[in-house]
Image (cartoon, rainbow, N blue to C red):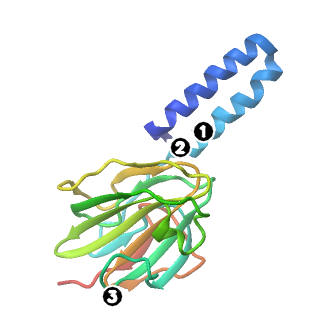
Amino acid sequence: MLIDRAGWPFVLVALGLALVAGWWLGRAGAVPLVVLAAFFLFFFRDPGRTVPADAGLVVSPADGRVMLAGAADPGAPPGEWQQITIFLSPVDVHVNRTPVAGRVTRVDYHPGKFLPAYRRESGAINERTEIELDHDGIPIVFRQVVGVLARRIVCRIAPGDTVTRGQKFGVMKFGSRMDVFLPLTATLRVTTGDRVVGGETILAVLESR
């Protein structure tokens, strides 16, 4: 299994400290830091995914549990949207994937608070990165939102990039949430409480043009 490159500094630092602790304190002193390194390897794991190929599908950009599927919160981007919010616990895969193919039209970083990511208002006031794609003339917006533990967003796409559905584009460190904003014409395929898998679970189907 692959490890996202954002995780290697954490792994290597923990292992380095384990070596130092082992030298000064013995094996017992190194064990907690080895366990920490193992957790970092687990947290930043990047398993392979099979992305559905049918046209018009919107796939989940993250692993986790659906907190909201329906009318958008007041903090949604300007316009009329349906919203799907996914909460990622610390044990979920945190590598993020694009929900649709298209051209990146904007990537906006917003500094903010660090409320628990499961609180509905956190999507509008927490630290976040908001990304908009043009999918054959249909705008799709999604947000990486950090929470109490997650204090760092990694986004590896920029305006002008062309992406494919299910393409890996970033990671959120140590618990977070993902918001997806879809046009009102989209047919949602998930409901609140569903477990979703990034790059594989179908969140919605877009109206064909």
| Residues tagged 2 and 1 counted as in contact (Cβ below 8 A) | yes
Which residue is more in the foreground, 82 or 65? Answer: 82
Residue 136 position in % (x across, y down)? 17, 73
Question: Which residue is at a point 34% across and 78% down the rendered structure image?
Answer: 182
Task: Inspect the image, locate mark 2, and give the three-letter code of the amino acid beneath it.
Answer: Phe
Which residue is more in the foreground, 175 or 135? Answer: 175
Tell me if mark 2 has few (under 14), some (14-19) or many (20+) residues whose alpha carbon lies within 10 angstroms of its own.
many
Question: Which residue is at a point 60% across and 77% down the rendered structure image?
Answer: 193
Task: Inspect the image, locate mark 1, and give the three-letter code of the amino acid beneath it.
Answer: Phe
Against 181, is 71 above or below? below
Residue 24 position in % (x across, y down)? 77, 11
Quadrant of the rendered structure where residue 175 is? bottom right
Mark found first going from the N terminus, 1 or 3: 1
Tell me if mark 3 has few (under 14), some (14-19) or many (20+) residues whose alpha carbon lies within 10 angstroms of its own.
some
Which residue is tagged 2?
44
Against 193, is 46 above or below? above
Left or right: residue 45 versus residue 138 is right
Tell me if mark 1 has few (under 14), some (14-19) or many (20+) residues whose alpha carbon lies within 10 angstroms of its own.
many
Residue 91 position in % (x across, y down)? 63, 53
Q: Secondary structure at mark 2?
A: loop
Left or right: residue 149 versus residue 106 is right
| Residues tagged 3 and 2 counted as in contact (Cβ below 8 A) | no
Which residue is tagged 3?
184
Task: Inspect the image, locate mark 3, and give the three-letter code of the amino acid beneath it.
Answer: Leu
Quadrant of the rendered structure where residue 66 is? bottom right
Which residue is tagged 1?
40
